[in-house]
Amino acid sequence: MAFLNIVCCMREKTYRSVVKTISWRTIGTIDTILIAWLVVGKLEFAVTIGGVELFTKMILYFLHERTWNRIKFGKIDDSDIEYQI
C-alpha cells in the first residue's frame, strides 16, 4: 500500500508523456493499417492512411495527455498528511 501512496503524489514528466504517446501510436497505427487493408484491400492505401493518422493522432494524444496531467479531477492530494504508515 505504501507504493500506492507514493505513486498518487507523483507528477508525470513531459518525456514520459512523449514515450507513452509514441508507444500507443505505434499500436494504434498498426491497427489502423490492418483495418484499412481489410476494408480497402490495398496495402499501399492502408499504409498511406496509417502514415497520415500516425502524426495527427500522436499530436492530439500528447496534447490530451498533458492537459489531463494538469487537471486535478480524480487526483488525491496527500501532501497535507503529517504522518503516514
Image (tube, helix red, strand yellow):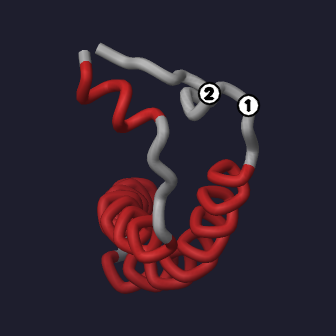
Task: Answer with the quarter of the image where residue 36 lies.
Answer: bottom left
Reply above or below: 61 against 1: below
Give the residue displayed 72% in from the left and 57% down from the top.
Answer: 67
Element on which disc 2 rests: loop
Q: Decide which of 11, 23 is in the foreground and name it.
A: 11
Residues tagged 1 and 2 counted as in contact (Cβ below 8 A):
no
- Please identify, in this view, whether the residue under mark 1 or under mark 2 is nearer the observer: 2
Instruction: Tell which circle, 1 or 2, labels the residue nearer the N-terminal end.
Output: 1
- Quadrant into which the C terminus falls: top left
Q: What's the residue type where badge 2 is placed?
A: Asp
Whole-percent x, y for residue 1 in the image: 25, 16
Q: CA distance from mark 1 to mark 2?
A: 18 Å
Q: What's the residue type where badge 1 is placed?
A: Phe
Q: Decide which of 74, 47 is in the foreground and name it.
A: 74
Which label belongs to residue 80?
Answer: 2
Give the residue displayed 35% in from the left and 71% down from the top.
Answer: 19
Query: Residue tagged by mark 1?
Result: 73
Position of 2 with respect to 41 (left or right) is left
Task: Answer with the quarter of the image where residue 44 lies.
Answer: bottom left
